Image: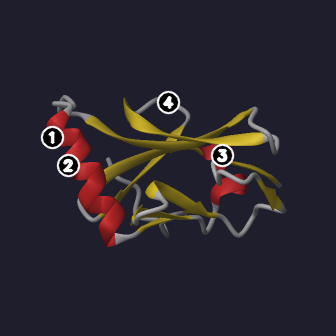
């Protein structure tokens, strides 16, 4: 059952298009959704997790643009208000993370400290 709470993160329309394209191209099985989280490591202390997975007991579940999203409840304190976007420019191409909880980020933008 999808919880009817405020979505802790945002995913831009451009990022949604790319995530759904990747799901289709990689034949991600039904019942899987987007897992968003953090893990220790990276040059600034934490790295972002972004991948496809099934819901686990510790997860909260919500839907963004029809895409099921799973996140461990304990990760919310690091990710609340974060926006995932997709850039498709000459110098940068890929997912970007804009996190208001980050006190410092690395040059590549995939790790942060809070």
* Residue at left offset 50%, top offset 30%: 57
Chain-order first, disc 1 or disc 3: 1
* Residue bearing the label numbered 3: 75
Specify few, some or many for label 4: CA neighbours under 10 Å numbering under 14, 14-19, or 20 or more: few
- Judging by the rendered image, the residue that carries numbered circle 1 is 24
Circle 3 — which element? helix
Q: Position of residue 94 (x, y in %)?
A: 43, 53
Q: Are marks 1 and 4 in contact (CB under 8 Å)?
A: no
- Badge 1 marks a residue whose secondary structure is helix
**Residue identifier under label 4:** 57
Q: Please identify, in this view, whether the residue under mark 3 or under mark 4 is nearer the observer.
A: 3
Q: Is residue 89 above or below residue 60?
A: below
Q: Are marks 1 and 2 in contact (CB under 8 Å)?
A: yes
Residue 21, which numbered label? 2
Viewer-side label of 1, 3: 1
Q: Nearer the viewer, residue 45 or 2?
A: 45
Tell me where residue 101 appears, x and y as whole percent: 75, 64
């Amino acid at each position: 059952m999808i919880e009817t709470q405020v979505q802790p993160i945002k995913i831009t329309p451009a990022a949604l298009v790319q995530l759904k394209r990747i799901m289709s191209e990689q034949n991600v099985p039904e019942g899987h959704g987007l897992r968003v989280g953090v893990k220790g490591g990276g040059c600034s202390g934490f790295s972002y997790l972004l991948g496809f997975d099934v819901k686990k007991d510790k997860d909260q579940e919500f839907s963004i643009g029809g895409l099921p999203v799973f996140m461990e409840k304990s990760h919310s304190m690091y990710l609340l208000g974060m926006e995932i976007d997709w850039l498709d420019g000459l110098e940068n191409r890929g997912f970007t993370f804009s996190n208001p909880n980050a006190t410092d980020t690395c040059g590549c933008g995939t790790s942060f400290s809070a």
